[in-house]
Amino acid sequence: MPTPGGPYSGIWNIRDTSKFIQDNAWPFFFGASRVVMGGGRNSGVQNIIDFVDLSSAGNATDFGDLTAARQGPSSTGSRTRALFAGGATPTRVNTIDFVQFTLGNAIDFGDISNTVRDFGACTNGTRGIFAGGSYTSSPVNKFENVIQFCVIASTGNTNDFGDLTTSRGPNNGNMCSTTRGVFGFGGTNPSNGDANVIDFITMASAGNATDFGDATSNKQQGSCLSSSTRGVMGGGGSSPSRKSNVMEFITVASTGNATDFGDLTQDIGLLCGSADDTKGIFFGGLSPSAYSNVIDQITIASTGNATDFGDLTLGRDAASGTCSNMGAFG
């Protein structure tokens, strides 16, 4: 039999086989790429979780619910488990929820060390790592430099990992290889300014982030995704609109400045991205006229403009999502 990831590896008995069937785990055993997308805001904070399977373009389908409605959570995960951390109800929270990639409602995982929203994440399939974020909006947004991690296979609170080179957010999504995590552009202290800073860490070794390079311009409220080799940042922008259709990319294994990738189908901010090792999607967000339900798709290895993938079940911004078959899992 093929070698799966997650809890289904090894020699099976009848009980293991029954659980495999009950969990509807066939797609994940054979490397299916499911993206779950949770939370967000549309005339109110949302608890919904949608999903799409990247192999087939089309509209998202209902997956289940978070334990509470919240906007601006951060997501990461493994082949079998997705985490949704932090966010705002609209009061900022430190809750971590998790789901298996089979359908169902989220349950409690533990807590992050601070109450933040709109922050970055990365994973190597074992560790989930969160960085930065907005911890208050009064009188202006103020941002964290904290990096923290948890072990995805077990439940519990996060532990300290280190610090970003500068406090910042909002920016979400995962950019990571099997060994390196990269945190893209975002707002900076002390006055909610826009930034072009990109940092990186070695995920297996706790410590402070190191400068990677610069985005093509100062901005915030964008998102990012990656294969195991290339990271793509999309949307967001500079004040006052903080919306654009710009995508730019980096090579995760090397350091250096970002380069133009192509354009999204619309000007957008507060969107989210997720990907497997081939295809990436950017979804939701706030367009100049409305909460967006648009899902755009790109082929990560080939620069060019995004094309339509489908629609979310509800247009919303400040959601987050993660994929069951990220390139970072090897």
Image: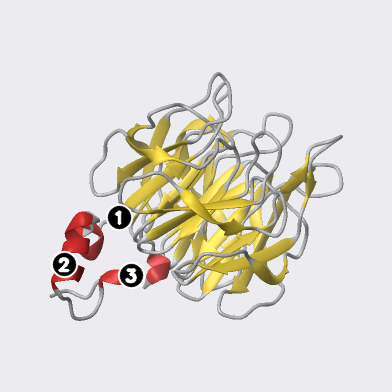
User: SS at mark 3?
Assistant: helix
**Of the two numbered discs 2 and 3 in the rendering, the one whose residue sits closer to the viewer:** 2
Foreground mark, 1 or 3? Answer: 3
Residue depicted at x 56% and y 79%: 204
Image location of residue 182, percent across then percent down: 58, 64
The answer to whether 294 is drawn above or below residue 191 in the figure is: above
Q: Residues within 10 Å of mark 2 (few under 14, many from 20)?
A: few
Residue at 71% from the left image edge and 49% from the top image edge: 115
Q: Residue 33, labelled with which disc? A: 1
State the SS at label 2: helix
Quarter-of-image position of residue 148: bottom right
Viewer-side label of 1, 2: 2
Which type of secondary structure does the marked residue at label 1 adopt? loop
Tag 2 residue? 17
The colour scheme used here is secondary structure
Amino acid type at circle 3 is: Gly
Indicate the position of residue 205 as horizontal and vertical percent values: 61, 81
Quarter of the N terminus within the rendering: bottom left
Measure the alpha-carbon separation of dots 1 and 2: 22 Å
Measured in 3D between alpha carbons, the distance from the residue under mark 1 to the one under mark 3, in whole angstroms, is: 14 Å
Q: Amino acid at mark 2?
A: Thr
Tell me the residue at 56%/74% (across/down): 203
Q: Which residue is mark 3?
A: 6
Mark carried by residue 110: none
* Quarter-of-image position of residue 45: top right
- Residue 301 lies, in percent from the top left, at 37, 59
Q: Is residue 312 visible?
A: yes
Q: Does label 1 or label 3 sit earlier along the sequence? A: 3
Amino acid type, label 1: Ser
Q: Is residue 216 left or right of residue 98?
A: right
